[in-house]
Amino acid sequence: MNSQSGPSNRVPLTGDGLGPADRRVTAPSPLYLNLPIYISIIAIAVALFIKTAVHQIPEGHVGVYWRGGVLLHRTTSPGIRVRLPLLDTFEAIQTTMQTDRLTDILCGTKGGVTITFDNVEVVNRLRRDLVYETIRDYGVQYDRIWIYDKARHEISQLCSSRTLEEVYITQFDQIEGQLKDALQADCNRYAPGIEIIAVRVSKPTIPQSVLDNYVAMEVERTRAMVALERQRVMEREAEAERIKEVSQARRVAETSAIQMQQLLAEKEAQRARAEIDNDIFLAQQKARADAEKYRLEREAEGLRSKLTPQYLEYELIQALTNNTKIFVGDRLPSRLLLDARTALRGVFAALETTEIEATAAEAESEQQEQQEQEELGY
């Protein structure tokens, strides 16, 4: 082993035991030193991209996009959507029913009174298939043109053609329907995508002085209406009473007529029965008269056949025989002859009486028969 004295070629060591050459090899790279900065920049860029490019369209809305201020001919449905950052802008347009509320609408009536509608609500909806055309023609604030401004104008027109009483009372119930029809008519003509569902109008506010006069007038009108209604009630009651009396009188008249008809029917029946009884009686009397006539005729015929001179002489002899008397003298007394003559006269008188009675009975029978024929209408 040789040991030499003199200067040494070895590099002196540092405190960590590494030389200068070793320290240059193990020094860290600048990229690794800036990595957190790069990661932060990338994260910020991604966040900005997500913030500006990714967006959400809520349910019941349609996405409308502009690129460089130009409306794109496309719409998107609800959900997560992407757009070009910094170039595209979007707007979510509601297509469900919405209520546009107007307040403090002033209008003048036909009589010059200014009234205020405190609240007017217009329920409307934008059709999904016509969103692009509506936004293209009238912008995102389309309802400002066709609902807010148009409703104020139509209310002013309605008030100017009506009196205060018509607007406040008599035709107030028609205002909502007329306003809805007017709004829908213009929308159908110029903005068909807008549908007017309903219109709600609050009671207008009128000046206090006019209101006081109107209330006083309404009180007087109410009193007049009450008096008129009371008069109508009295008239209806009187009419009802009159109808009742007429009904009672008609009922009494009908009852009397029925009773009269019944009485007439009874009298007619009695007359018919009397006629029948009379016919029966006349028939009986006629039969009796005919029988009596026949009997008398037969007796008269019998007497005529008997009253011959021989029979009369025979009867005279019989009469004289039955009255036998003895007279003394040369002739009969004149009284005896007188009695005989009287007897003969009685016989002839009886015969004449019988003939007269027969003739009278025959005449009476003919007269009765003629009367019966007249009664029967022959």
Image (tube, helix red, strand yellow):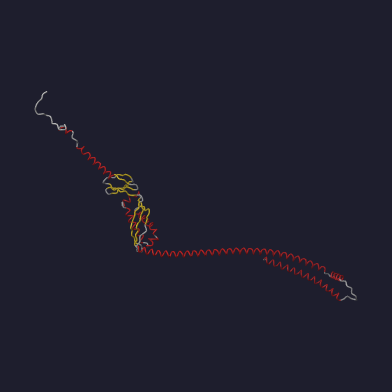
Q: Position of residue 258 (x, y in %)?
A: 60, 63
Q: Give the total number of marks visible in the rendering.
A: 0
Looking at the figure, which quarter contains the C terminus?
bottom right
Q: Which residue occupies the foreground of this view, 113 or 213?
A: 213
- In the picture as drawn, the residue positioned furthest to the left comes out as 6
Q: Position of residue 241 (x, y in %)?
A: 52, 64
Q: Position of residue 157 (x, y in %)?
A: 35, 60
- Asked if residue 156 is positioned above or below residue 45 in the image, the reply reads below
Q: Which residue occupies the foreground of this view, 173 or 222?
A: 222
- Asked if residue 43 is positioned above or below residue 139 in the image, the reply reads above
- Asked if residue 273 is positioned above or below residue 190 in the image, the reply reads below
Residue 144 in the figure: left or right of residue 309 = left
Q: Position of residue 25 (x, y in %)?
A: 17, 33
Dividing the picture into quadrants, the one containing residue 249 is bottom right
Dividing the picture into quadrants, the one containing residue 361 is bottom right
Q: Which residue occupies the foreground of this view, 96 or 131?
A: 96
- Asked if residue 343 is positioned above or below residue 94 in the image, the reply reads below
- In the picture as drawn, the residue positioned furthest to the top comes out as 1
Looking at the figure, which quarter contains the N terminus?
top left
- In the picture as drawn, the residue positioned furthest to the front comes out as 15
